[in-house]
Image: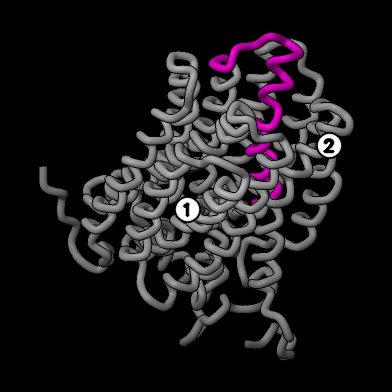
Amino acid sequence: MTTSSGTAPRIHPAWVVLVAVTVCMMASSGLRSVFGVYIKPMEAEFGWTRGALSGVAAISLLLLGAAGPFAGRLADRWGPRRVILLSLVMLGIGSIGAAAVSALWQLYLTNGILLGIGAGGLGLATGSVIAARWFEARRGLAIGIAAGGMSAGQLVIIPLAAALMLWFGWRVSLFWLGLGVLAIVLPLATWLIRNEPADRGVRAYGATGASLTAAQTLDARRAGRVGIVEAAQYPQFWLLMSTFFVCGYTTNGMVLTHFMPHALEHSFTEFQASTALGIMGAMNVLGTIASGFICDRFGRRGPLATYYLLRGISLIFLVYVWDVQSLHLWAAIYGLNYISTVPPTTTLTASIFGRYSVGELSGWIFFAHQVGAALGAAIAGWVFEIYGSYSPAFISAGLLGIVAAALTMLIREESVIERPLEPAPA
């Protein structure tokens, strides 16, 4: 691999871009995910109900998903760099604004809308475009590393947010997190991230064969695109959306939003619950990167079904956690497959519908994920208000995980680009 000057770089620029994107996704995921830490302090200060605060999380999750298709389409057409920079600005402003709220509608605007849309621009769709453009080889591993950044956001930012809140209060915690995004992460992204390998004078990592001209690349991109209307005619697309809906319901929506108050109401301390989230994040990083490696070596469908099955079982186990050791054991098991579904889902999308469609279609698939997350957040809050317990919600999520494992095995892993379009059976 050579640069335009003919020298061989020691590290391919694709890995540099990937590291920068991973840091951005870590900041985005972590900042949007800390809301559960602030639920009880906000209840104590303002008297807002659990249902009202769950609505903030639900709006944020829904907008995070709704932004995905548009962010992916913009990244496909205009390049991911601009989408990433704009998203970081929204995240920083949203967090700083949330630190100054005095009314519930202000919390919906800042933590719900701004953080939701900002995180949507730095979600799966945009990360998938980076991986598809910069990597021909090791694409599953690249997506696993980027998704691992989302997991690392829990490992780093949630305990940091909890510590800042305990020391200085929830307002100071939100303010410094937002300032960190604008002062550290935004300049880093501006410096290191580029849209295409050609912007650095190199080819994609692992690219083989003759280099394409700009015109040939544009023709290939047009010929290889499968739009949402075409993709909707294939059952694979709907199966990917359905299983990722369950992924959102069983992770971001229910567990990430309600685990902290669930743990506190079962006599665990804030430190013990935050430690469990940290363990979950650490195991999640390991599990997600390992998932990308497994996808590159052993395929996608079988591992994906296994992840959903293990998640379903672990959520049912959560209801029966009895002490700190069992809580941390659950966090380790659950964390291993928290975002491990991302590499197989994204690489399945790329292999079935093509690399030039992965941004937009991953955005729609991720939208289904966030619809599930929004419903999970809202339903768990309603279940708690009715029954005074999260157990029915967690058991329902576990059963859905088992159903998703069965649906995954129905996905046909074959490209739709090389053969004529065939409508899905009724």
Is disc 2 surrounded by few (<14), some (14 to 19) or many (20+) residues within 10 Å? some
User: Hey, which quadrant is residue 225 in on the image?
Assistant: bottom left
The N terminus lies in quadrant: bottom right
Residue name at image x 37 percent, y 47 percent: 312
| Callout 1 amino acid | Gly
Tell me, what colour scheme is on the image?
one colour
Q: Amino acid at mark 2?
A: Leu
Percent from the top left, x then y, of residue 280? 60, 51
Which residue: 76% across, 13% down?
A: 45
Are circles 2 and 1 on residues that touch, CB within 8 Å? no
Residue 146 circle label: none
- Badge number at residue 359: 1
Side (left or right) of 211 relative to 190 = left
Image location (x, y in percent) of residue 303: 37, 64
Q: Nearer the viewer, residue 322 or 248?
A: 322
Position of the C terminus by quadrant? top left
Q: Which residue is mark 2?
A: 164
Tell me if residue 37 is in the magenta stretch: yes
Q: Magenta region's main secondary structure? A: helix
Image quadrant assignment for residue 257: top right
Is there any visible trace of residue 354 in the rendered image?
A: yes
| Quadrant of the image occupied by residue 420 | bottom left
Residue 125 percent coordinates (x, y): 51, 50
Left or right, 86 with respect to 371, comes to right
Local packing at callout 1 (Cα closer than 10 Å; few below 14, some 14-19, many 20+) is many
Judged from this view, the residue extending furthest toward the right is: 168
Q: Give the vertical position of 386 relative to 91 (above or below).
A: above
Indicate whether residue 296 is drawn in magenta.
no
Q: Which residues are magenta?
A: 25-52
In the image, residue 394 lies at what x, y percent? 43, 35
Mark 2 or mark 1, which has the lower sequence index? 2
User: From mark 2 to mark 1, how far is it between C-alphas?
Assistant: 36 Å
